[in-house]
Amino acid sequence: MRNQYPPLHSLRPMPFWAWNGELTLERLRLQIRQMKEMGFGGFFMHSRFGLKTEYLGERWFACVKECIAEAARLELSPFLYDEDRWPSGYAGGKLTALHPEYAQCGIDYEFCSPEKSVPESDIACFALQLEGETVVGWRRVEPGAKLTDQERFCRFFEVPAPVSESLNGGSYIDTFNPAAVQAFLQLVHARYWEELGEERALVPGIFTDEPTYNGFCGKLPWSKLLPERFYETFHVRLEEHLPELFFEKNGKPESKIRLDFYRLITREFVNAYSRQIGDYCRAHNLASTGHVLGEDDLFSQTQAIGSAMRHYEYMEIPGIDVLTEHWQLYLAAKQCVSVARQQDKPVRLAKLYGCTGWDFPLEGHVAISDCLNVLGINLMVPHHFFYQMGGESKRDYPASISPHSPWHSIYRAVNDRIDLINRTFAPTREIRRILVIHPQESIWFGRPLEAYGREQVINRNGFFLHTGAEKNAEMNRAQGITDELLRRHLDFDFGDEDQLARWYRVEPRVLHVGKAAYQAVVIPELRTIRRSTLQVLEEFVRQGGVVFHQGAVPDFVDGLPDRAAEVYRFFRSLNYADLEEFRDVSCTLPTGNEAETMLYRLGEGDDRKVLWLCNTSVPPQPDIHAFPAIRDRIATLSDVQISWRIPADYQIYELDVASGNSIAVKARREKGQTRFSCDFDRLQSRIFIAVPEAAFPTISEFPHRVGELPEVPISGPFRYELSEENLLVLDHPCWALPDGEWQPKTYVLLPDAELRKRLGLPPRSIMARQPWADQEQGGEQPMLRLRYTINCRREFRQVRLGIECPEQWRFSWDGVPFEAVDRGYWCDEAIRALELPALTPGRHVLELTTQFGKETALESLFLIGNFAVNVRDELEELPEALSEGDWTRQGFPYYAGNITYHWDFEAAGEMRRFDFSDCVGTAFGVSFNDEPERPFVAPPYECRIETRPGRNHLAFQVYGSRRNALGPFYHRGVPYLITPRTFREYEGSSRQLHHCGIACGKRRKVQS
């Protein structure tokens, strides 16, 4: 039965709203209005580090209720989030404080003396027989047993989940234990149900974040419940076979015990956690949504969750997480979308943009959302919209997709674009004719994770590292076929073997899996296959279906030696050319090859067909975590021949995703298909709609291509306007304690960490205990002095000092104390702007004094005013004009706003082309002859301009970011991902700044 959760007002993006301070109703309402203005469709109320309002306390629920009411008034969708930070399940630390018996544990082993015994943690002990480094046998023994010369004593023991400050002093829960998850539901979900009253009818759903069965406490997941469950299921004593979970026997990789172990723990985890939460939400008219940890690939799923697809079965809105700009998670997206389609779940979610940093361009927001949406993910959850930016919060995986960022005023263009695409596909059905058997169980059955070495690790960010040719080959069972089918434009779904057995139905030449139908099945090369899968596929073939297989026939069925050749003889060895009969779309280059940087999505409605073509500008990569940076994806495509299988009487129109207008496409009919050609700029998407009659205003042909028109000259010097005042960053003070010498200039976060260590105070970190849960008082509070030197080339008045928590400090300027007079704030209300004395030419000394304690936060300071900053960080007169090139070298190295360039040129009233693909910024805006600005948030970065005879005026706004004010600065090279730790790295004293400006260099295009 379908979940009757309140309908979403739209499928516009809905950000994680980071509640990370002392919550006030006024500010919450204001930010909801800001979200509406930015074009968002709702939000997820998400506790983050810095929260001072008690999580799930009286004030918390008052804020939640007010936000739900305000969202209803503005027709936004207010989602809940089920945890204080992440991973979901520990109820803000309260659960294991009340029920320590529900804490998670893992299993590990050690080689040790036979005399060692730890009864409270030991599970079983074995004598392992070795030949060199190879384990050739084992026997179970008791501590103190006599061993032969070829044997080593090995104890297997439980590892309890550690008490963690990031869990507010609690431990993560045993996600195999239904009672533990039931306690979580009572502490969180049931509390929301009780407290929200009438407002609960306005809440669409609740997000669960990164649950796992391996909470970083052991080499493998474990629970006291597992031995009994294993015996009940497989009639084998798991305790007698523990070495098989960690070691290969006689060098043989396959293990029936290991396969059954992962089948069991996946089932137990899914039933205890995802199923119970899904059932609760369904019973209370809430959509269960979120994502599980480690859905990226086959190894990470084995390590963290078992199988992502089996969790999605119980999520009404299944989702994935895409961190950084470097992750190519086609496999994860396909897993999610496949289950959603098979269960007729139209909404699929992706949390995205995390770890990208303050300067991530809006073209990156568009490119990543396009890449996911074209694969069938349609609800984007940007990470994230900060409530406030004080202290560590500003480093909590920025950027803040909010008015904290200077491009917020045009972010609606990004959201409008996504909304238009979703509305275009809303009345259509997905068309994918090929089913691929998912090979997850072959990884479970293969080598133990331990055998691959310890280079595979998982850290607190849920980021998995996979290295080595053998691992890549194993992951290629799923990743390789995913990439190959996508680059050949043969779209497909995955079929999980467990779900296939329960959801299948066969008709002549059609295999139904739930609500989806397929005409062909592809089996990757498997180590083992389920007997139920063979039975389904044999029945499909007998009714005229077609099954292809890659590689060798598996030697095992359900983990037991039993060649599947008897059934495989009905299958064909895979030749991709044989899949042509199941093709709907072809996108070929002039060479005749499929354009492998292109992804497509096909929708079919009662009166139309929709085709979306997306140039990702980079082909699928072997390493899914090594996609190039967005700015480095520069491949364009020319004269792409599109072949589309549609009725002969259908007319094709192109939908302009920026304006929503449509235009007729000149096409031809060949070999039963409709064909046309088009070009693609870097990262460009194009959407085509085919209808049986002229349902749109018809234009006979495309107007002039922009590239064929004469260019508007870009020639400085330029008049310019700043959107806000300039900055000088002060982050290297000298510092001193009472009776101590002044220490040399040091990056301000380093003495903060050193002093905390000296005083026995906890380090500042987003993984520290939440302020609302931290009742401990600090001890000794020594007097701390900071000293900054400032050099001016001329006199400046009305310069302000940006500082956090000014009430904690005393100030002096050139030795003279001055009062902290508040003159507003910069960027966020947490960063106050204080009035400074006049700055005269010469050298000045700013000193700050405080009693350093637990609540003290040493942070960068900012001088704010109408000045320029030269290469020696001296303040000088603003330039009268700007030249072409990087503005950081023209007096604005730390500038964190936008700059509008103005220039005039002569024309004769003709159509011109304005090409700004060599400009650098987070986004751009063009205003011609005082018309309203037109935002450009994605390529192509060019536009047609109809000039008037005589003088014409162009205003070109380059949108900046907070990156050159807030960092990170002191790393070598370009960080792979931006985390809170990145801001603390200090690998050199020179600041690494990001360029920004007009005509900054080479145009970012290359022909593919």
Image (spheres, grey):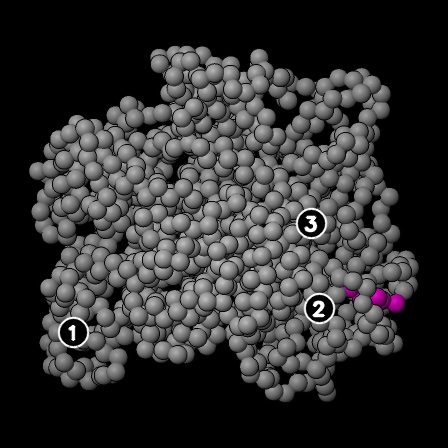
Q: Nearer the viewer, residue 141 or 159?
A: 159
Principal secondary structure, stretch drawn in magenta = strand
Disc 1: which residue: 126
Question: In the picture shown, does residue 798 fall above or below 418?
Answer: below
Type of the residue with mark 2: Glu
Residues at marks 1 and 2, CA–CA distance in whole angstroms: 59 Å
Tag 1 secondary structure: strand
The label number, if any, that marks residue 406 in the structure image: 3
First to last magenta residue range: 833-837
Given contact means CB atoms under 8 Å apart, are the residues at marks 3 and 1 in contact?
Answer: no
Which of 743/157 is in front? 157
Q: Are marks 1 and 2 in contact (CB under 8 Å)?
A: no
Is label 2 in a helix, a strand or a loop?
strand
Q: Choose top left, top right, bottom left or bottom right for residue 505.
A: top left
Label 1 CA crowd tier, 10 Å (few <14, some 14–19, many 20+) = many
Residue 616 in the image: above or below residue 818: above
Q: Residues within 10 Å of mark 2 (few under 14, many from 20)?
A: many
Q: Secondary structure at mark 3?
A: loop
Residue pictured at 57% horizontal, 74% vertical = 771
Q: Tell whether 58 sits left or right of 559.
A: right
Q: Taking the image as drawn, is residue 635 in sight?
A: no
Q: Amino acid at mark 1?
A: Phe
Report the residue at 30% width, 63% height from top: 272
Q: Which mark is residue 804?
A: 2
971 left or right of 259? right
Q: Amino acid at mark 3?
A: Pro
* Residue 834 among those drawn in magenta: yes
Q: Is residue 747 magenta?
A: no
Find the residue positioned furthest to the front: 198
What's the distance in space between the residues labelled 3 and 2, CA to CA? 20 Å
Q: Nearer the N terminus, badge 3 or badge 1?
A: 1
Sequence-wise, the earlier of marks 3 and 2 is 3
